[in-house]
Amino acid sequence: MALERFVGRRILLLGLMVGLVSMLLVACGDDEDPEDGADGTTTATSDGEELSGSLNIEGSSTVAPYTRLAIEEFEALHGDVTVTTGEVGSGGGITAFINGEVPIAAASRDITDEEISQAEAAGLDPFETTIFRDALAIVVHPSNTVEQLTFEQVARIYAGEIANWSEVGGPDRAIVLYSRNEESGTFAYLEEEVIQGALGDDAEYSQDINKQANAPAGLTAVSGDEGGIFYAGLGNLADIPADAVRVVPVAAEEGAVAVEPSEETVASGEYPIARGLFYYTDGDPAQSSDPLVKAYIAFVLSPDGQALGEELGFLPAN
């Protein structure tokens, strides 16, 4: 009898343990993935940490159209997160980053050696993440009949060496120069990579230029000026009606085929005025102690984040 009672107790105990394990497995199976909300949207980081709080991004107006789209998607994924962005220009964004005002600076140019030194003096380790490749479109008033330009002609126009459209096959009309201002990475890019790239290190912008606070302002100005010329990133062209300005094809050199900027012509190297777009953070964002910085940059570089940029005409980072 003692043996029977012992065996009975062992069987009862085993049954209870099996039941407990089954309950636990069912409970785990009913739980949502720790990264998913009730509607299937991501609400946590890859290691299960819930995201909340605010994130500020400042800088390039060329990058801004993309950042606005990315913010919309990122906030939809993380309901307790708020992200804001501004368009003070690449230089202004990097300055805000150096001053500790924002954790992410958006730029359409490389950070300078001087800015790196300033960031390091402030205790920062500036890290560059290439988020896209972009092209600068050269735009004129729709009535302008100039058929194409070369890389060197664009440089000479902005250096003030070509002052009438008739000199490049257009109408007999004075050229009116519109550019970004000094805070813009696009302003610096055109001077350093186009004007100086074609005409030498001592070349610079003409003194007779109309500086614009952002790309939409420049595009709008040219849409109302028959002699005007401006440059803007592909993503900025969506800021105004499609027929408000005309994009002029550009050839790499005299005799080469002139092409309009597009994903294909930038990828092939045919379009000569192309550059990278960047986010700057304190150290590698993949290792950031700030979960919002880490998660946001990871989203931007993800297939979904890159697809948003491609909608604006940007080329993927990789």
Image (cartoon, grey):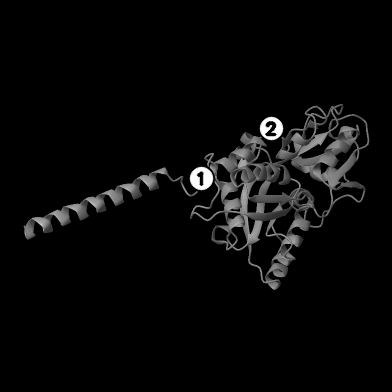
Residue 269 in sight = no
Q: Position of residue 260 (x, y in %)?
A: 71, 33
- Which of the 4 image quarters holds residue 65? top right
Q: Which mark is residue 156?
A: none
Where disc 2 sits, the SS reads loop
Quadrant of the rendering where the N terminus is positioned: bottom left
Mark 2 burial class by Cα count in 10 Å: few <14, some 14-19, many 20+:
some
**Residue drawn at point x = 58 percent, y = 47 percent:** 299
Q: Which residue is mark 2?
A: 257
The amino acid sitting under disc 2 is Val
Among numbered discs 1 and 2, the one appearing first in the sequence: 1
Report whether 35 appears left or right of 158: left
Toward the viewer: 281 or 203? 281
Marker count (numbered) = 2
The amino acid sitting under disc 1 is Asp
Q: Which residue is mark 1?
A: 36
Q: Position of residue 316 (x, y in %)?
A: 59, 42
